[in-house]
Amino acid sequence: MALDIADATDQLLGEGDIPPVHEVNAAGTSPFLLTADHYGRVLPRALGDLGVADTDLVRHIAWDIGIAVVAERLAAMLDAHLIAQRYSRLVIDCNRPPGVASSIPMISEATAIPGNEDLSAAAKEMRRREIFDPYHRRISAAIDARIRAGRPTVLVALHSFTPVFYGEPRPWHIGTLYHRDTVLPRLMLQHLRAESALVVGDNQPYAVSDITDYTIPIHGEARGLVNTGIEIRQDLITEESGQQQWAERLARILREIEATLREQGMNQAVTSPASAPARCRRRS
């Protein structure tokens, strides 16, 4: 299981490990900047299987099932830049404030993660330094470059959620997540609710907060960008047909929203005054 190898060295990722950041269409012309914090479920070789069964490593506790394909297809359809993170959220959750219990969970949805128990401060910092930090530096750098170039930027954080949570069915097909800025979520809700037979969550199944999120508070709200989180129910995007359907639906809706924002004056719409008080924190 190799649970203690990384604790004995000053480096987590080594030969045979892939970089944490995955990008698609970095030169895309769309105002939408897409992120996928839980895109992958790769484990660093030094951590083995974290003491977790193979059957659990393909569950939601390890990654957002289905969102990788949806995100890539959406990026292609919109000509948008996608920045995604390849390593499992069980190694370090890239949509949690470092240091909170859910950042490197010892238990996830009642499943013990032995490889996350009794970690030294140095081992935790190594995971942050080599996986979390490069991912968020890349998002920050992309936003910086777009701002310097005078390019409108709208942040869309893509996730998926389980149809049942602790025995409770979740009725929503999709939800928009937000905190301070409601510009894009309101438009998303309007368009999604116009779709026949969709049950749409308004800050469901989760709500963004400074305590439980990172990407939207730090890269969206603190930068003054119009933003939203999007959660799609996993059973709808497990298969290729559903992934294609949802990518097409989101592409169509986001194009319509882009037209609306441009009519309103895109540059003003993309720097929403409700979005950027002091520097804040995070959740998923």
Image (cartoon, rainbow, N blue to C red):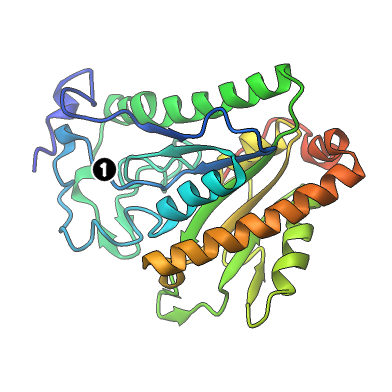
Q: Secondary structure at mark 1?
A: loop
Q: Residues within 10 Å of mark 1 (few under 14, many from 20)?
A: many
The x, y position of residue 33, in whole percent, is 61, 38
Q: Quadrant of the N terminus?
A: top left
Residue at image point 77% right, 22% down: 150
| Residue nearer the viewer, 176 or 106 | 176
Left or right: 41 as drawn, with respect to 44: right
* Quarter assignment of residue 132: top left
Question: Within the image, what quadrant is residue 202 found in?
Answer: bottom right
Residue occupying the point 85% across, 43% down: 262
The type of residue carrying mark 1 is: Val
Q: Position of residue 233 (x, y in %)?
A: 49, 68
The answer to whether one can see residue 117 in this image is no
Viewed as shown, does residue 84 lie left or right of 196?
A: left
In the displayed structure image, the side of residue 126 where residue 157 appears, left or right: right
Comparing 60 with 198, the one in front is 198
Q: Quadrant of residue 272?
A: top right
Q: Pointer 1: what residue?
A: 42
Q: Position of residue 261 (x, y in %)?
A: 83, 46
Hey, which residue is sitting farthest left in the picture?
A: 1
The residue shown at (54%, 50%) is: 74
Residue at the image point whose x is 69% and y is 53% from the top: 254
Percent coordinates x, y for residue 17 in the rendering: 21, 30
